[in-house]
Image (cartoon, rainbow, N blue to C red):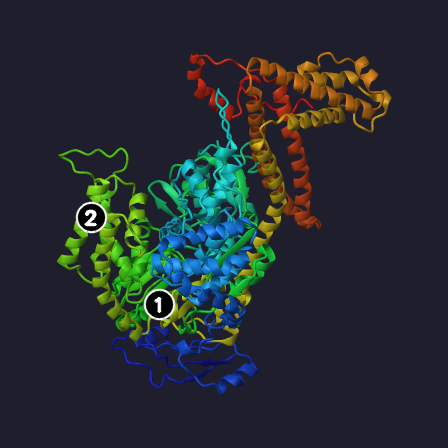
Amino acid sequence: MELVVSTPSVDWPSTAVNRPPSLSNRRCTADNKVRSLIDTHSWLRGGEKSLCLIGLGKNERRRSSSRRVTSPVASLGGLLGGIFKSSDSGEATRQTYAPTVSLINGMESQLYSLSDSQLREKTANLQERARRGESLDSLLPEAFAVVREASKRVLGLRPFDVQLIGGMVLHKGEIAEMRTGEGKTLVAILPAYLNALTGKGVHVVTVNDYLARRDCEWVGQVPRFLGLKVGLIQQNMTSEQRRENYLCDITYVTNSELGFDYLRDNLATEMIVSFTLQSVDELVIRNFNFCVIDEVDSILIDEARTPLIISGPAEKPSDQYYKAAKVAAAFERDIHYTVDEKQKNVLLTEQGYADAEEILDVKDLYDPRQQWASYILNAIKAKELFLKDVNYIIRGKEVLIVDEFTGRVMQGRRWSDGLHQAVEAKEALPIQNETVTLASISYQNFFLQFPKLCGMTGTAATESAEFESIYKLKVTMVPTNKPMIRKDDSDVVFRATSGKWRAVVVEISRMHKIGRPVLVGTTSVEQSDALSEQLREAGIPHEVLNAKPENVEREAEIVTQSGRLGAVTIATNMAGRGTDIILGGNGEFMARLKLREILMPRVVRLAEGVFVSVKKPPPKRSWKVNESLFPCTLSKEKTKLAEEAVEVAVKMWGPRSLTELEAEERLSYSCEKGPVQDEVIAKLRSAFLEIVGEYKVYTEEEKKEVISAGGLHVIGTERHESRRIDNQLRGRSGRQGDPGSSRFFLSLEDNIFRIFGGDRIQGMMRAFRVEDLPIESKMLTKALDEAQRKVENYFFDIRKQLFEYDEVLNSQRDRIYTERRRALEADDLQALLTEYAELTMNDILQANIGSDAPRESWDLEKLISKLQQYCYLLNDLTPDLLTTNGSTYEELQQYLQLRGREAYLQKRDIVEKEAPGLMKEAEKFLILNNIDRLWKEHLQALKFVQQAVGLRGYAQRDPLIEYKLEGYNLFIEMMAQIRRNVIYAVYQFKPVMVTPQDQKKGDKVDKMNKNGRGSNAAANPSASAVNTV
C-alpha cells in the first residue's frame, strides 16, 4: 500500500515554522496498515496541504506509481462536478422547435407596427378563435409573438429564441430544464398566456410568497397589458380575496397555499341557528386546467415526502410531554435506547424499558390508558434527531420548523403525532394541543389532478426517471442563450469536519483577497453561524442568509449584493433560490431599495392597535437598508428628486394610507418599464430611473472587475441527498455566460457519509487518522458516489411508498370529495336522500335477518324494533304486515325500501309545512357535516392501519396489499355509515322556531353543532345512527 503526498497550489496560512524539506513528491511506503508518517499539525503550521491515496490494490498501485502527481484541488476525482452534467446540450431541442421559432420571428415586424390598443385587440381575437374550437397549438405562434412584443413594450425585455423554445416545451406538458439566469420567470408567461385564452384559468406555482408576489408584479404586467386578469394568492388573504384572485385568467400562488385551499374547499361546513351553509359560491378554487410549476423539482421531488395535512385540535394532557422530556434527558444513548439516523427512529433497550417504568411508576409503558411509550419515544426523537438551529429555530415561545431544502422557516407547519409537542417540552416551552388530521393529500396526487401539468427548473435531468414514472412528465433540456463557461473544480475530501471547515475559511480568504465574490452553501443554521464566527475571527466581512428572522427579512438585499466585488455570502441550503446573483451587484434592485426606504415609511399605514399621539410619534417600521449595500452614496440631486416624487405620492395617496402589500405593488409598477398613465407612478419611475443611472455607473465598472477576477465562486460544504440539489448550488454561478467556478469541501464525518456510507467509508476513517489533509483515492471517490446514490434511492423509495399508499387513499378521496361536491352543487337532494333511505333499509334488513337465513328463523320482532328505533314513522309495522308483504327475502327487501322512501317523503312534507325551504338546507348540511366528520375519523383509522400492516411483512404478507384490503373495507363501511347517519337525522329532525332571545344563544348552539354535541336530534341533527342498525 502506498501513501502519496503532494504540494498544492493553494496558499495556506503559515507561521514562522519551517516547511518539511522536499514535500512535493514524497512517497512513503506503509505495511498492511496505513500509518501516518507526517505530523499533521506541523504541516498546517508550515502552510502545506496533503493529498493521500489510500487503500490501493496491487493493480491500482502499479498504475499510481506512473501517475503524474498534481494539485489536490485539481486531481481529486470530481465527486460531483462535471461528471453529472447532462451530455445533452439542448441542440436536439433547438432543432425540433426551429420551424416554429422561425414562424414567431417572422411576425415580429408586423406586430411592432401596431399601437398598444391594436396589440391588445389581438387577445380578444385569439380568445374568439379558441372559443370557436381552434386548437391552442395552431394559435401558439401568434400568441407567443404577441407576448414577446408586449414584453418588449412593458418590461423592456425581448424573450430570446431559447426562451420561446422553453415556452413551447411547457405548453406540451413537459419539464423544461433551463440553467440559472436563462429567464425562466419570463418563459412562464408564454404558455400561461396561451392557455389562459380558453378562459379556464392558469395556475403559476412558485415555492414561496415572495416569489409569487414578485413574479405577479413583474412579468404579470405583460398579460395585464394584453387584457387578461392576473391574480395573486398570499398567505394572509381572506376567502373573498382568494376567490376573486383564483377567478383571474392567470393566478400566481405557492404550492402550499394552492394545496391547502383545495383541502379547505372540501372540508368547511358551518351551521348556526338559521342554517348558514357552505355553498358552491364560497368555494375559492375554480376547476383545475393548466399548471406551470416554477422550481418543479423542489415541489414535486423535495416536498413530495411530506403530505399536505389540515389538522384540528385534539385535547391531550401536556404534563406527560414534560415528564417524558425529563426521562429522555436522563437516558443515555446505546444504554437506554438506540438511534437509527437513517430511518429517523429510536428504540428503547430492555434497560430503557425497565428504567422508564420505574421512573414513571407504571407497570407497562404500553398501557392503552396512558400510552407512555409514544411520549417517551417522541421525547428521545426530539433529543437525538430534531436539533435546534438545524431542524428548527425558536422565535419567541414558538418552535418553527426549518425547511431542509430551502433553509426557510415553514410558517404554520407542525410535526404530527405528538412530535412537535415533544420538541416544545424539550425546550421547556408552552405546549400546544395535539392535533388530529381533518384532511390530507400528497403533492403527487394533488398535482396529478391537473389535466395539463408542466414545470421548469435548472436541475431535473438526474430525476427524469421519477418525473416520468410518477408524473408522466418528460424532461427536455432547453439550450442556453450563451455557452456556459463555469468551471466546476474537483472536490476536496477530509477525514474530519474540523479540517474541512479550516480549509473552507482558507478558500474564502484566498478568493476574497483577489476580489472574487463567494457564495458558501451550508446545510443548517448552526453551521452557517459557526462559519460566520470563524470568518469574523479571520476579519473577513460577510453576510449570512438563513432561517433566523433577522436574516430572512433581508434576504433580497443579501442576494442582491452577493455578486459584488469581494462579497462573501453564507446561505443555508438554497435560501435565496429564485433570485439571480448578478456580478457587480444588481443596480436596478439597489435603486428600488433606495426608493423603497424613502417611500414606504410615508405611505404604509400603521398596524391596527398602534397608538399615535403628538407627544409620542408612531413607532417606525424600518425599511432602512444598510448603506454598505449601495455602490455609492446617492448624490444630493438624485436624493432630492426621489423625495419630491415621494411627496407627490403622499399628497395623492394620503399619508400612511396603504397596506404594505398595496404599497409594494405600486412601487413595483414604478420600477418597471411598462407604459404608465398614472402621474404619481410616472413621477416615481422618473426618480427610479435617475437613481438606476447613477448606480449603474458603478455596478457596470464593478462587474468588469469581478469578471476579470474570475466571477462568482461557489463553495459547497456538504453533499446533499441528491446530486440535483448539489448542482442547484453550483448553478448559482456562471449565469448567462458569465465566468465562475465551484468547489465542494467534504468530510467523511458528514451526515450523508456517516449514515449511508457503510463499512467501506468507516474503514477508511479508521485507516486514515490525519484530520487536516485532503484525501484522494479512486476507492474513496467510488465509495462517496455510492453513498450518495444510496441516499437518492432511499428517499426515492420513501416518496414512491408515500405515493403508493396515498394512491389507495386518493381513490377514496376522489369518491368522497365527488359525493361532497354533488351535495354542495345540487339544488334539490331528494333523489340522493331517497337512495340513502332505500340502502339504509337494506342495511338494517341484512344486519338483523340476513339474505341467507331460512324463512323460519326470521326474528321479525327484532327487525321491527330496530326499524322503529330508526324512524318513528314506521310505528305501524307488525310481524303480520311484514309476513303479508314479504314471503321471500327479496320481497321483504322491496317492501322495506318502499316504506323507507315513503317515510322520507312524509317527513319532508311535515317539515316543509312548518318551515318552507328549511328541509333542503338541513339535508345539505347533514350530508356535508357527516362526510366531513366521518372522513376525519376514517383518516385516523387509516393511519393506524398503515402503522399496523408494516409488521405483517414479517409474516410474508405484502403490507401494501394488506393496507389496500383493510382500507377498502373501512371505506365501504364509512360510506354506509354516512348515509345511515344522514337518513337517521332526517327521520328524527324537528325544526325549532327561533325567538329574538334564542338568537342571542346562537353562538353557543353553533359551537355545539360544530363540535357534534347536543342533547337531541333537533339540537344536533348530525346525531350518529351507529347503534341503530
Q: Which residue is nearer to you in this view: 160 or 129?
A: 129
Q: Amino acid at mark 2?
A: Val
Q: Amino acid at mark 1?
A: Val
Q: Residue at x 54, y 64 (%)?
A: 789
Mark whose residue sits in front, 1 or 2: 2
Across and down, in percent, residue 334 comes to: 51, 52
Across and down, in percent, residue 114 comes to: 38, 58
**In which quadrant is the C terminus drawn?**
top right
* Left or right for 678, reference 184: left
Q: Residue at x 41, y 46 (%)?
A: 231
* Residue linked to disc 2: 646
Q: Residue at x 26, y 75 (%)?
A: 15
Look at the picture and state if 855 lies above or below 880: below
Disc 2 residue crowd, few under 14, some 14–19, many 20+, Cα 10 Å = many
Q: Marks 1 and 2, Cα distance to the nearest angstrom?
A: 45 Å
Mark nearer the N terminus (1 vs 2)? 1
* Left or right for 373, reference 9: right
* Residue linked to disc 1: 504
Q: Residue at x 74, y 26 (%)?
A: 842
* Left or right for 708, reference 312: left
Q: Which residue is nearer to you in this view: 169 or 303?
A: 169
Query: Could one spot residue 368 in this view of the protein?
Result: no
